[in-house]
Image: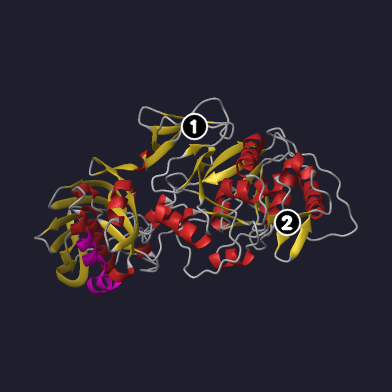
Amino acid sequence: MTMSDWSFLDAYAASDPMVRRGQKILSANDVRLEAVRLKALLVHGDDPVFLYCEDSGNFLAGLIAALSAGRDVLLPGHAAPGFLVEIGATGPLLLTDQTGLDAGATIISVEPQHGVVAPSLEIDTGATIGFFTSGSTGAPKTCIKSQAQILSEAAAQLVLWGAPCGPVIGTVSHQHIYGLLFRVFWPLMARASVEAMRQDMWEDVIFHAREGCVFVSSPAHLSRIPDGLSLVHRPAHIFSSGGPLAFAASRDAFIKFGQVPIEVLGSTETGGVAWRQQHGEGEHWTPLPQVEISSDENGALAVRSPFAGGDDFVVMGDQVTRHEDGRFSLHARLDRIVKIEGKRVSLPRVEEALKGLAAITDAVAIDLPERNGALGAVVVVAPEATAELSALGAFRFSRVLRRHLSARLEPMELPRLWRFVERVPENAQGKRLAADMRALFSDSSNDVPRILERNISEMVAEFSLELNPDLRWFAGHFPEQPILPGVAQLHIASVLAEEVWGFVATGSDMARVKFRHVMQPGAKVLLTLTRNGDERLDFRYLMNGEVAASGAIKGIEA
């Protein structure tokens, strides 16, 4: 098989099972017939098409149809309507099996057919497949891969792990490269059948497990295997990708399923890079076949392989130590070093310290550019500490945690803003996106006016503000002549005080509050905040050199 060879599809006889949809079996002929129908709709255009399907059989038919029509394919990672509009996945350019996403979308539906034999389809190997990644900001960007890159990696995985002897059951989506490789191409290259649906719950995974089955999962799922699962058939393999798996989670999977997960390190851009099985803590990573490993002057992992394309090394964000046997150890990500108060702070170091506290079971540290660069912590509290959190309240409890952390971390490494959650947000691939973390600290993007200039010291902070008309406070207050209400003025002062000093208003005690002049959309005002002792904040709004509002707010200082 050559790197860009699709001959494995022709290895399926017309009646061979290609997709298993519960109790329903879809043959290779069924998939081909739907691909032929779709190709006829696509041959007259040349714009890239967007393919989003929940069912892997429908996805496969759409992919074959688009590539055989010579159309480049883009794979959205999810189908939130706003996201689809943002990337242009609308109208007939959207191929999907989901009704209701777009009235003009092309609907895919593979169903059993009888008596009609599909003609062969020839894939245009020049067409590309693109994935959407979020990067560090959450803004969608595309990563375009050639068919040769993707198929060569699937072929390498087949050589490395052999053919699956049972169903390949996935908790991850085929819309991402890891799921596409392991849930779709790997079984197909072995002339096995593909499981149509992704299984979100471990109970569903176990229900669909059969002799010789394979679990294709992620650290997110493997870290949350419920106790008491009854496993009749031990999986032949368990795969994990999307980030390193904690040794405790790897050992838990071995205890419950009898297999140590095979972790695959990589990215959308590079493809698979290395693998490991944690038979012991700190197991090193072994490069995949055809993958060359190096590191740059900062110790960052650099990769060259046919899966990445090109002859140059691609530098990744992971810091590594290379060993004489060709393997390597993985350390913190270098791109998670941020500036807090002008000093470099390692977010992984902060997270390690947080997780080291008995009261915390999981945590993510994140810098918050929209909150004056403050350091935030998204925290899952241990069951035995929930009573203390409830009794003290979120703010006072966070101060207790800060005191414990101060024995290990420097002052600028101590999170200033905290969010306590039942579970850290993750996407379908188990990745924790910076944008999702930051969203937890943004009650509303139009809560606070536009800051034109700021001047901050230990006791006094001045903000030059423009009251932009889209502030939510202006909506309906009053429709004919909107003004900034007093409660909004107090809220803005409190939010900015929390950002710069960690001062949190209690909302229960205010003094000498006076509202002298109305503030309307478009006005420019100067807000001065003054710390008066440890538990009082004085505020004053100036407009055209005159005091528009002033007062004092009681609170708790960090």
- Choose top left, top right, bottom left or bottom right for residue 309: top right
Disc 2 residue crowd, few under 14, some 14–19, many 20+, Cα 10 Å:
many
Q: Is residue 71 visible?
A: yes
Which residue in the rendered view is the most extreme toward the top? Answer: 311
Q: Position of residue 47 (x, y in %)?
A: 68, 41
- Which residue is at a point 19% across and 49% down the rendered structure image? 411
- Residue kind at label 2, given as amino acid type: Val
Magenta stretch prevailing secondary structure: helix
Secondary structure beneath label 2: strand
Q: Nearer the viewer, residue 430 or 515?
A: 430
265 to 523, vertically: above or below:
above
The quadrant of the image that shows the C terminus is bottom left
Secondary structure beneath label 1: strand
Question: Which residue is denoted by mark 1 in the rendering?
Answer: 303
Q: Which mark is residue 187?
A: none
Is residue 537 on the magenta stretch? no
The quadrant of the image that shows the N terminus is top right
- Which residue is at a point 18% across and 58% down the rendered structure image? 403
Disc 1 residue crowd, few under 14, some 14–19, many 20+, Cα 10 Å:
many
Q: Total marks drawn?
A: 2
- Residue kind at label 1, given as amino acid type: Val
- Choose top left, top right, bottom left or bottom right for residue 300: top left
Q: Which mark is residue 19?
A: 2
Q: Position of residue 82 (x, y in %)?
A: 54, 56
Q: Nearer the viewer, residue 497 or 214?
A: 214
Q: CA distance from mark 2 to mark 1?
A: 35 Å
Which residue in the rendered view is the most extreme toward the right? Answer: 115
Q: Which residues are magenta?
A: 386-401
| Left or right: 462 as drawn, with respect to 83 | left
| Left or right: 373 as drawn, with respect to 161 | left
